[in-house]
Amino acid sequence: MDVCGGLISSQHTLIPIDSWSPASSLEDNIQLYRAGNSCFSLYANYAVYLCALVLDLFAGKHTEVVYTRHWNELFNYIEDWYTQRPSEMLSILELNAPKGDYSRPFPVVLFSNSAAVSGNQLYHTAALLMLQEKPRGAAITRSNKPRSILWHARRICAISISNEQHGCWTNSIQPLWIAGKVMSHPSEHQAILDIYAKIERETGWGAKWRADDLKSYWGDLDG
């Protein structure tokens, strides 16, 4: 919930990131989380930690050189999270969105457990935010070019729509809002509004306020 609050306010987490782990350096903290990939639920916590690091980076005051160095280091850790996922964190079914079927604008991305749902969604959220704030000196080349902002945004939406674990839905309200701001097609907008309505209806967790925020952000696109 601390990370969700940070995503809402675009600020540091309330618990300082230095207090999240007993290790004295970022590299040591990362190694502690990586060591947990034998327990997939702990590996999901690693995604939460990375997302908190993103918020901490953006809220800090850095020179361009320092920011670029930290950005490169953190983005590498985020991408490493995705490539090194244990098997339990992998999707069990993926289907592309059918072409021309505007009732299903997002792909199916199905996971077998709640940790995988929330962990992967937070990975995509962290990667999307980082790419939106990519510095000019980012160490990205043609050989290691990352996926696009739109790809990550579509995966965030797909994960919430494809997986119906209620606990994961309450964690998805802010990622959906972040992803929704990237979307431009009315069918995508409607699918996001529909999942927000379903979350509030089935869990009782307030989601309409974020749906209303998105409708204001989209403006006349659906008019």
Image: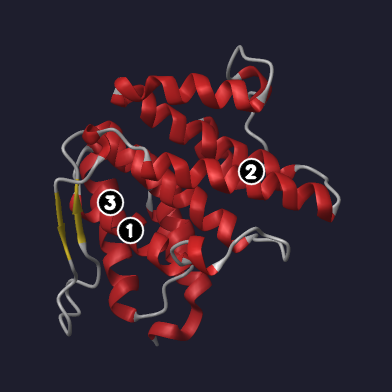
Residue at image position (65%, 60%) is 133
Amino acid bearing label 1 = Arg
Q: Which mark is residue 73?
A: 2
**Residue at the extreme top of the image, as rendered:** 22
Amino acid bearing label 2 = Glu
The earlier-in-sequence mark between 3 and 1 is 1
Which dot, 3 or 1, sits closer to the camera? 1
Label 1 Cα neighbours within 10 Å, binned few <14 / some 14-19 / many ≥20: many
Picture quadrant where residue 92 is located: top left
The earlier-in-sequence mark between 3 and 2 is 2
Q: How many marks?
A: 3
Q: Which residue is mark 3?
A: 160
Amino acid bearing label 3 = Ser
Q: Is residue 104 above or below residue 8?
A: below
Q: Which quadrant holds the C terminus?
A: bottom left
- Name the one closer to the observer, 165 or 121: 121
Q: CA distance from mark 2 to mark 1?
A: 23 Å
Q: Is residue 206 visible?
A: no
Q: Which mark is residue 155?
A: 1
Where residue 158 sits in the image (x, y, percent)? Answer: 27, 58
Q: Is residue 20 above or below residue 115?
A: above
- Give the SS element for disc 1: helix
- Give the color scheme: rainbow, by chain, secondary structure or one colour: secondary structure
The earlier-in-sequence mark between 2 and 1 is 2
Residue at image position (39%, 20%) is 36
- Give the SS element for disc 3: helix
Label 2 Cα neighbours within 10 Å, binned few <14 / some 14-19 / many ≥20: some
Residue at image position (23%, 55%) is 161
Where residue 40 sits in the image (x, y, percent)? Answer: 30, 26
- Name the one closer to the observer, 193 or 44: 44
Where residue 47 sits in the image (x, y, percent)? Answer: 45, 36
